[in-house]
Image (cartoon, rainbow, N blue to C red):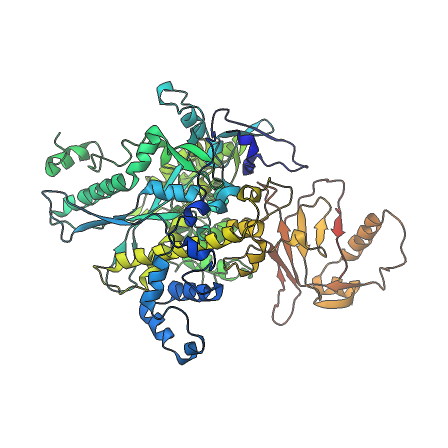
Amino acid sequence: MDSDSVPFPVPPALYRRHNDPIISGQYHPSSGFIYGRGETLLDKLKADENERRRKHAMYYPFRDDGEWDLGKFLAKHLTLSAINEFLQLKWVNREKPSFKSAEQLVGWIDALPGSPSWQCTTLELPPYKSERPIRLIWRDAREVVQDIVSNPMFANYMTFDPHVVLRGAEREYSEFFTGDRAHHIQVDQLFTHDQLIEGATIIPIIIGSDKTPVTKHTGGLEMHPVFVTVGNIQSDVRMQATSHAWRCVAFMPIPSFDVHPDFQTLLVSRVFHRCMDIVFGSLKQSAQTGYFMTDGLGCIRNCFTPLADPWDIKKFQKQAKLVKLLGVHQPFWRDWKFADPAFFLNGEILHTCHKFFFDHILKWCKEVAGNYLLDTRYKTQHKRIAVRHFGSGVSHIKQMTGREHRDIQRTIVPMIAGAGANSTPLFVYSIRSMIEFIYQAQNPTHTNSSLASMVGALKEFHATKQAVVDAEGRRGAKGVRDDFNIPKLELMQSFARNITNNGTLMQYTADVTERLLITHCKLPFERTSRQAATFVDQIVAILNREESMRRFDLYHILRLSQAPLENAVLQEDEEVTTIDPALSFISRVAPEQEHSFKGPRPFRNHFANPKGFHSSDGAIAFHVTVQPDHTGILVVEMQRDYNLPHAMQYIVDYINSASGGTPTSLWSPTTGKVDLWYKFRIQLQSSFRSRYLTKSQAIQAYPCSPERPFGTYDAVLLIRPNAADIFGKFVYLGSS
C-alpha cells in the first residue's frame, strides 16, 4: 500500500519552523511499509455482542451519559460496600439509577468491551518448596502492545521509521528512532543474516518493573508489577502517566522458599526470569518472525518487537560467584532477538543521577560546609514561586522527590562557595562539574557537541575529585575514604554511548514507573479487603474495570466523530503547542465533547493571548494581571522605592528607541507616570524544540516593606540576540 496516501505526522525531531532552517534529516528507505487496511479499534469495539443495542442506546447498559458518568465515578473512587451504602441514601431515590447494587454496577462494567484478558499461572521450582503457592498473574504482552499501537489517541504521536536528524553539520539524538540502534536493527550492518525483511516496522519494547510496599505501617504486603510501553510513541507523551501509554502486564510473585538464606535471592531471581519468559514469550517470537499489527489508523504493519547441571543450586551458585554472576542460568532476554544488555540497559536519570546526588554529593557538601552553615544558607534564600523553599534546611531530609532533588541541585554550588576552610575553590569546582554533568544528561535533545560537553564535565569531576578527599568530604564508618568505588558513578561512563544508541535518557527515566506504582498498586489497594491471599486479584479487577471504562469512553468519542479517523491526524503546523494526547484527540475528532474531558488540563499558553506582550522575535511571552499593583506612580518615586538611580534614563532611551527617535509630547520624564506590577509571568519556547512551550514562570519584584524588609527580587538572565540593540523590542498585541 502507498504510505503517501496516509497522513502520518512528522517526527518531532524533524519538525522545522520557518525561522529554524538548519534542521535536516532522512528516513530509512526500507522501513515501516503498510500492507493494506485492517480492523480499526472502533471496528473491534463494534464487534461486542451488545453493539446492536447501542445503535439506539449508545451507553447501554447504562441509561444515558449522565448515568454512565455516575457509574464511572462510583467505580473509580468507592469500595463496593461504599457504593451499596450510597445507593441506599434517600436522596438517590429521587431518581434511581438503573443499577441497584455495587455488584450489578461492576458486573455491567466488566461486561463492556475489554482490554487483553488476565490469567493466572502457578509455578513450581522442584525440589525447592515455597511457603505459599507461587502465582503469576499476567496477560499476553503482545496483545497489550497491539492494544497500545492501535489506540487512535496516539496516532498523531507515533513514529515507525528510523531517521537521521542533522542540526547543521551535527547529528542530533532525541527519540529512540534517531539513534544508531534503530538503524542497526532495521538493517544490521554487522550480521546481514540478522537484518529485518524489507518494509519491517520496529516496535521497540520498553519495560519497567519495581517492587513496592502497599501497606503503610503494618502488614508487610508488597507488590511487584511489570509495565510495558512502546518506543514509537513520542517520549514527552509516553512519559506522562496520565496518557496511559504504559500498561501493566503482570504482577510478579514474591515467593519465600524454605531454604538456606544464601539461596533465597537466587531462587527468587530465577522465578522472576521464568515469569518474564511467560509474559513476554509472544513478543520474543515476534522479534524473530514478525507479527502483523494494525496501527491507530487501521494500517497493517509487519511488526518486529526488538531485548554444569544448573539445578544443583549449591554447586551452581558456588561456580557462578567465582565469575561474579548471580546464578540465574536462564535470563529472560537470552532468546529475545536484538536484546543485548549492553544496549537495552540504559542509564537511568532518577536513580543514577538524582539518587547519586542525594546519597553522595549532598553528603560531601554537608561534611565540608557543616550542617549548620548549609542549613542557614538555605533558610535565608528568598522564596520563589513554584520552587521548594527549604525553610528548615536540608541536613535533616531523609527522602526527597525528583523535583526536590532538582531544586537543591540548582543552588548547591553557590551554597557551598566559601563555606569554611575546607570548601576550597577546587572542591567547589569538582561539585560544579558533577552538577553540570547531571544537568546536561537530562537534555531532551543532544548533538555531538552537547555530548562532548557532557562527557567533558564528567572528566572534569574525575580530574578534580581528589579535592573531595582532601576536604574530608567522603567518609565511611571508619573515617575518611580515599576511593570512589561507587557503582552509580561508574554507570555514568556509559551515558554518551547509551544516548547515541537509543536516544536521550530522559525518556527512560523511572519517574513514570514510580508514579505507576502509586496508580496501579497503592491507590487501588485502598479499595481492597487488604487480605494477603486475595488483594492482588482484587487490584487486577479494579485495574481491568478502569481500562474498560477508558475504552468505553473512547468508543463513544469515535462513534460521535463524523469525519474519517485518518482525517484526524493533522500534519504538523507552525503553532507552538503543548502536549496532551487525549485532549488533542478529542478536540480533533469530537470537539463538542471537549468540555466534558476530565483529564489534566495543559498549562496556559500565553503566546495565544491576543492582549499579551511578545518579544519582537516571538520567542518570549509576558503576562500581567489586568489591574496593576500600583497605578500612576511617578518615575522618581519608583526610583526611590526600588533604588534604581538610572531607571529614568533607561525609560527615556527606550521610548526614543521604540518611537524611532520621533519626539513625543505624550510623556514627560519629570511628570510622566507609570503603572507598577509586583510580579509577572514569563513564558518561553523550548530551547530544544521551538514548537513546544515551557511552563510559564512567575518573576517577583517586591520593594522593601515591613513584611519584606529586604524586598523580594528574582534574578533573570537576559540573552540579547543583537548586542547592538541594547533595548530590544516588545510588541503589545492588544489593548486592555
Q: Give the percent coordinates (x, y) of residue 117.
A: 31, 49
378 vs 693, left or right, is: left
Relative vertical location of residue 422 with respect to residue 626 in this rendering, above or below: above
Q: Is residue 58 visible?
A: yes
Q: Residue furthest left?
A: 127
Q: Give the percent coordinates (x, y) of residue 627.
A: 71, 66
Q: Give the percent coordinates (x, y) of residue 569.
A: 56, 42
Name the residue at 49% across, 58% down. 378
Q: Give the percent coordinates (x, y) of residue 691.
A: 61, 43
Name the residue at 73% across, 68% down. 630
* Camera-nearest residue between 708 and 617: 617
Q: Is residue 594 visible?
A: no
* Camera-nearest residue between 107 and 151: 107
Q: Quadrant of residue 491?
A: top left
Give the quadrant of the C terminus: bottom right
642 vs 387, left or right, is: right
Relative vertical location of residue 287 with respect to residue 581 in this rendering, above or below: above
Q: Residue furthest bottom?
A: 90
How many discs mark residues in the rendered view? 0
Relative vertical location of residue 57 with respect to residue 30 in this rendering, above or below: below
* Camera-nearest residue between 667 and 475: 667
Relative vertical location of residue 280 with respect to residue 627 in this rendering, above or below: above
